[in-house]
Amino acid sequence: MIKVLKPGFYSSIQDFGRFNCQQYGVPYSGVMDRYSAGLANVILGNAPDLAVIEMTVLGLTLQFECNTFICITGADISPKINNENIQQNKPVEINKGDVLSFGRLKKGVRGYLAVLGGILSEEVLGSRSMYKGVTEQSVLLKNDYIKIDVNNLFSIKKNSLIKVKIDNFKGNVLEVFKGPEFDLLTPEQQSVLMSSKYTISKNNSRMAYQFEESFENNLEPIITSPVLPGTVQLTPSGQLIVLMRDCQTTGGYPRVLQLKESSINCLSQKFTGDKMQFKMLEY
């Protein structure tokens, strides 16, 4: 078991999300940055989609009540074991009683903690991902206990450091495909949409990221239609909204673009004020 001493800010348990439930209005949920979360699991020898702890900006403090191995990836929040700095992107051995804590945020927004064998929290509708209204909790709380696999302990080579893709942290280009309503825009609007730079507003969360700049919009609302993570909606006021992992399952705003999976990962590691630009891909 792992005890939560300090929960940090919006720390939650997430895997790759819920599938085949959207017809009931249940969001996909899951880790915001699948690349980083999957990497943490793979380094430990886990399946990439096992549940991990997702941290946002501020790390949490945990005490381990058993021996295990962990791996931390994604945002660099200065991880420490018993106040000693540890490396990210490699296996770290944990002994019973060890305390994991975090310090200053150095890069990124969301960090991931994987545990050997995965986190064994309650599974609801085929996923361990926390989401308000689906699971009992939407975030981790002080004094929570997290169940992990203690029967899967074996030696791991700890001397290999994985080279991590840095696009999630340094890239400012979001690769996209045409959305269902893209061709309803005029050629001039399409050109402006693809050539402009957009600033991430303070309104960003696991549900959606909004941009500060407005975009000329004369499109009529559409009949409520399916949306999914990565869908870029154009509101009547001309605001662009990028739906993220906890987004609703349907919407009535024109869907002008659809982010590539890797671009969802990238956007999830960006701060308020960061500037992004779209790049069109061919199907």
Image (cartoon, rainbow, N blue to C red):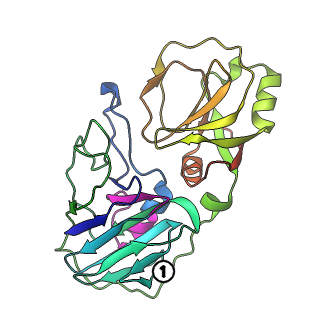
Q: Position of residue 48 (x, y in %)?
A: 38, 61
Residue 117, percent from left and from top: 26, 68
Q: Residue at x 33, y 26 (%)?
A: 23
The amino acid at mark 1 is Gln
Q: In the image shown, does 65 or 113 lie closer to the viewer? A: 65
Please name the residue shown 43% across and 65% down the image: 59
Q: Which residues are magenta?
A: 39-58
Q: Residue at x 42, y 63 (%)?
A: 112
Q: Is residue 279 visible?
A: no
At label 1, counting other C-alpha atoms closer than 10 Å, the crowd grade (few under 14, some 14-19, many 20 or more) is some
| Residue 85 lies within the magenta run | no
Horizontal placement of 92 versus 122: left or right?
A: right
User: Which quadrant does the N terminus fall into?
Assistant: bottom left
Q: Position of residue 187 (x, y in %)?
A: 81, 22
* Depth order, front residue of 103/231: 103
Residue 40 lies in quadrant: bottom left
Question: Quick check: 237 above or below 49?
Answer: above
Vertical position of residue 28 compared to residue 49: above or below = above
Kindly give the residue lying farthest to the left in the view shown: 151
Name the one closer to the observer, 220 or 204.
204
Q: Secondary structure at mark 1?
A: loop
Q: Quadrant of the C terminus?
A: top right
Residue 75 visible (yes or no): yes
Quickly name the residue at label 1: 87
Magenta-span inclusion, residue 53: yes
Label total for image: 1
Tell me if 252 is positioned left or right of 2 in this view: right
